[in-house]
Image (cartoon, grey):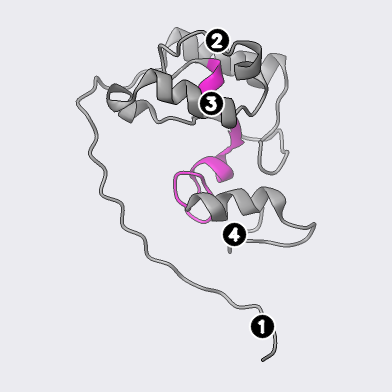
Amino acid sequence: MGDTPAHEQRETITECIEYPEHVQRTESGEFRANKRRLVRQMKIPCWVCGTHDNLEVHHLHEWSLWNDLDPEKVLDALHVYDYYGFTKADPETPIKSPDDIRNLVVLCADHHRAVEMGIHRLTGEIWLAQRAAKPGITITRKKA
């Protein structure tokens, strides 16, 4: 048997999510301050592709699900998904808000929301593979 040739594979994924009751989302002062710190002061690029264009900030633990999340379990997860070292620097302070800087990652608009490549649209392993792709290789149809 030989190698499988390169090919496109289409997937249809259905998610059924039970969102808890929550207030209409607004951009909190904590979120604005943390976004400013990450993007303007620290000049952190998109975590996936490294661009400084069209930057947005993504909640690792979704804002709309926050009322159903256990803050201790969130903190445990953030010890693993510590994109910028903020959890290591502050490992024991309880997480009280989804807008905590330890729960945020900088992404360009494409890697945040685009149908073909955004974290809100792809499974985790495909989204993550975009960061690890060899130069010139495109994991999803849309070119980064």
Q: Which residues are magenta?
A: 101-122
Residue situated furthest bottom in the rendering:
1
Q: Position of residue 34 (x, y in %)?
A: 56, 14
Tag 4: residue type? Lys
Marks 3/4: CA distance? Answer: 29 Å
Q: Contact, CB < 8 Å: mark 4 with mark 2?
A: no
Q: Secondary structure at mark 1?
A: loop
Q: Earlier in the sequence, mark 3 or mark 4?
A: 3
State the SS at label 3. Answer: helix
Of labels 4 and 1, the one closer to you: 1
Q: Nearer the viewer, mark 1 or mark 2?
A: 1
Q: Earlier in the sequence, mark 4 or mark 1?
A: 1
Q: Tag 4: Cα neighbours inside 10 Å, few (<14), some, or many (≥20)? A: few
Give the residue pinned by disc 1: 5
Residue 12, picture quadrant? bottom left
Q: Give me the C-alpha separation between circle 4 and circle 1.
A: 20 Å
> How far apart are the alpha carbons under marks 1 and 2?
48 Å
Q: Is residue 7 magenta?
A: no
Circle 1/circle 3 CB separation < 8 Å: no
Q: Which residue is mark 4?
A: 142
Q: Is residue 75 above or below residue 1?
A: above
Q: For residue 43, what is the image quadrant?
A: top right
- Labels 1 and 3: the sequence-earlier one: 1
Q: Which residue is mark 2?
A: 33
Vertical side of 54 occupied by 30: above or below:
above
Question: Label 3 amino acid?
Answer: Leu
Q: Is residue 133 left or right of residue 95?
A: right
